[in-house]
Image: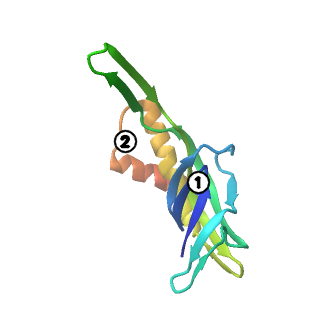
């Protein structure tokens, strides 16, 4: 099951268990947010297309982290005029995990193990950023296992 949702002026194809980087949302990490502007819902055999949105369709997601994207450089130059201008920009984003897609009576919910794995991955990446040293695959797996053991 998948859906097309709109947020921040962009459209995203959302599937269960997928992580998306959407424009910055005012939500705390760990909270659940709902997207009601769902443009299309498909369950494999049946496709519902909205005009402009599908009535009763909701996509629920959990906020995993907030961050800033890669730097985009803007360079302007006019030849033979001595004019050059260089600017940089980093866009803020919110990383979300799609946990539920529902349309009317149909609803698909993500298994809890997937959410725990996604949380562990985000925690490991945050720890890696703090240290400045990349974690090995073994360390990431150990952290994920420890996180699952705590819950």
Q: Which tag, 1 or 2, sits closer to the chain's start? A: 2
| Disc 2 element | loop
Residue tagged by mark 1?
150
Q: Residue furthest bottom?
A: 45
Residue closest to the eye, 106 or 29: 106
Give coordinates of residue 101: x percent, y percent: 62, 70
Q: Residue at x 71, y 82 (%)?
A: 105
Q: Residue at x 58, y 69 (%)?
A: 110
Q: Is residue 138 left or right of residue 10?
A: left
Q: Residues within 10 Å of mark 1 (few under 14, many from 20)?
A: few
| Disc 1 element | helix
Residue closest to the eye, 78 or 101: 78
Q: Residue furthest left?
A: 80
Numbered disc total: 2
Give coordinates of residue 123: x percent, y percent: 51, 45
Q: Residue at x 67, y 76 (%)?
A: 103
Check the image and report above or below for 92 versus 142.
above
Residue closest to the eye, 37 or 151: 37
Residue tagged by mark 2?
135
Q: Is residue 111 left or right of residue 52?
A: left
């Amino acid at each position: 099951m998948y859906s097309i949702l709109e947020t921040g002026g962009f459209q995203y194809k959302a599937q269960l268990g997928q992580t998306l980087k959407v424009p910055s949302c005012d939500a705390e990490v760990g909270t659940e947010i709902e997207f009601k502007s769902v443009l299309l819902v498909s369950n494999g055999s049946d496709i519902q297309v909205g005009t402009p949105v599908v009535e009763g369709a909701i996509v629920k997601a959990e906020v995993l982290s907030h961050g800033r994207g890669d730097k985009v450089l803007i360079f302007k130059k006019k030849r033979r005029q001595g004019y050059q201008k260089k600017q940089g920009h980093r866009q803020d984003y919110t990383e979300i995990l799609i946990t539920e897609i529902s349309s009317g009576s149909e609803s698909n919910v993500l298994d809890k193990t997937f959410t725990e794995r996604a949380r562990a991955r985000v925690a490991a990446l945050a720890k890696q950023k703090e240290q400045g040293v990349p974690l090995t695959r073994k360390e990431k797996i150990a952290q994920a296992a420890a996180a699952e053991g705590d819950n």
